Image (cartoon, rainbow, N blue to C red):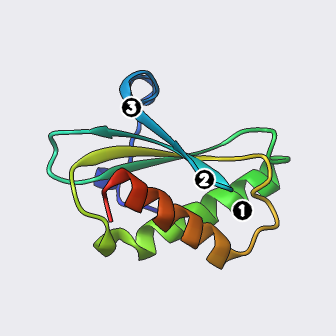
Amino acid sequence: MLHKKLRIRTGKEYNTIYKYGKKIGGRHILVYIIPNKLGRNRFGVITSKKVGKAVRRNKVKRQLRSIIRTNLEKLGGQHDVVVIARYNIYGSEYRALEKDFLNLMKKAGLC
């Protein structure tokens, strides 16, 4: 679990990020990024029902949060980041997901 200070928590914040954020797509995930004034990055992870039933969605969310947590030191800046799992993410290897995430962070200028 990400620390409370590192999470995006309200629906209003998510809607603002969707509306004004920069959208970057990868093979397995989609990322919305917007600058914030908090002095740190915050993250939100979303999986839709297209990924599968609740067990699969929760597994994917745990994997994505783990990737974020292990690579937190590599990420600089002050941004709000929403990571959205694509429908084809389930069954992908952890390393492939991590590589995809880091490539998107480089495109966004956070890495």
Query: Three-letter amino acid code at disc 2?
Result: Gly
Pointer 1: residues within 10 angstroms few (<14), some, or many (20+)?
Answer: few
Residue wearing tag 1: 59
Q: Disc count in the image?
A: 3
Q: Secondary structure at mark 1?
A: helix
- In the shown orientation, is residue 67 left or right of residue 106? right
Q: What residue does disc 3 label?
A: 21
Say which element carries label 2.
loop
Q: Which residue is mark 2?
A: 26
Residue 15 location in percent, x, y? 45, 23
In the shown orientation, is residue 35 left or right of residue 39?
Answer: right
Q: Give the vertical position of 20 relative to 67 (above or below).
A: above
Q: Amino acid at mark 3?
A: Gly
Name the residue located 53 percent from the left edge and 70 percent from the top edge. Answer: 66
Q: In terms of sequence position, does the residue under pointer 3 or pointer 1 come before the other?
A: 3
Q: Amino acid at mark 1?
A: Lys
Indicate left or right for 15 with 91 as reference.
left
Name which of mark 1 and mark 2 comes first in the sequence: 2
Name above or below for residue 18 compared with residue 35. Answer: above
- Kindly report the distance in space between the C-alpha atoms of the residues bearing marks 2 and 3: 16 Å
Q: Nearer the viewer, residue 32 or 11?
A: 32
